[in-house]
Image (tube, rainbow, N blue to C red):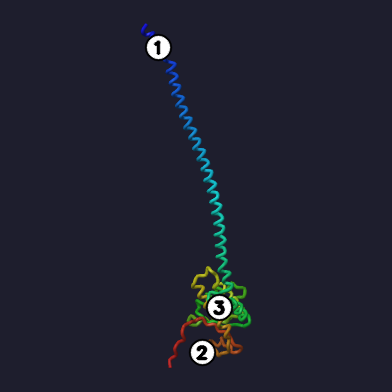
Amino acid sequence: MFGRKCLSEKLDELPAVIAEIIKNELAGVRDKLGSAHDAARDASNSAASASRGVNDLHSEMQRLGAEVARLRAALETLHAGPAEAHTTAAPDSDTEDDFDELLALAAGIAYAEITCHRDTWDFLVTQSSGGQHFRLPGFVEETDCLINADVSGRTLIAVLDALWRTRHDPATDPGTRHLATKIYGRIGDALRQIEASEPEPGRSVRFRRDDPPVAHIVIDDRPPAETSG
């Protein structure tokens, strides 16, 4: 009897136990659903934040693209600037009218005499040999590393043009620019100061040109040798 009574009581308590279990399980489900909802909400916020970030990044890329375009235009202007500036001013005291003047003077002479070191002569020929007016001189002699050469007025045009371009090229290194400037200046001086004179003592008779006067271009800043008395 006692065992049957205990079993009956247990059966009577079973619905309450089951209800408690169901209640606890439902509470767990509600918690999980709440967590899932919160996660979904956070994901939605993150997606919105990511979308805003993408939009901001796109705007920044557009701004940077415009800035790059502006800088490119500025660099192109700077690159063009020196070339344009060279059309109005030379790197020394000469003006650009000097270039046209020297071309006109060179075009009007039959020939000129050049005296320079053979390395300077090599530089001059290398610089100007690609010009359409350049012609190798008919007479060149070398004495003690010094070159004496007759060059035509047409060849002088090619030389002046090549040296002018070298002087005004921004990519030219300083040494080359100074060498080109020195030779260019000496040619200009000689073309402006053509005067009749006897050939210098010791020079080859093949250089005698007494009539008419000849432009003599000397590229040598050494002081004259002292003569013993």
Can residue 148 be seen here? no
Q: Nearer the viewer, mark 3 or mark 2?
A: 3
Residue that label 3 marks: 94
Reply above or below: 202 against 14.
below
Residue that label 1 marks: 9
Q: Nearer the viewer, mark 2 or mark 1?
A: 1
Q: Give percent across and percent down for residue 113.
A: 56, 83
Instruction: Say which of 183 and 142 sits in front.
Output: 183
Q: Quadrant of residue 27?
A: top left
Identify the residue at image location x=42%, y=13%.
12
Q: Are marks 2 and 1 in contact (CB under 8 Å)?
A: no
Can residue 50 be seen here? yes
Task: Name the element at disc 2.
Answer: loop
Which numbered tag is attached to residue 201? 2
Instruction: Say which of 8 and 173 sits in front.
Output: 8
Picture quarter with the C terminus: bottom left
Q: Give percent across and percent down for residue 130.
A: 59, 72
Picture quarter with the N terminus: top left
Instruction: Say which of 139 and 211 sits in front.
Output: 211
- Residue type at tag 3: Asp
Q: Are marks 3 and 2 in contact (CB under 8 Å)?
A: no
Task: Name the element at disc 3.
Answer: loop
Task: Name the element at disc 1.
Answer: helix
- Residue type at tag 2: Pro
Report how far apart the C-alphas of labels 2 and 1 lie in the structure.
Answer: 149 Å
Query: Which tag, 3 or 1, sits closer to the chain's start?
Result: 1
In the orientation shown, which residue stands out farthest toward the left? 2
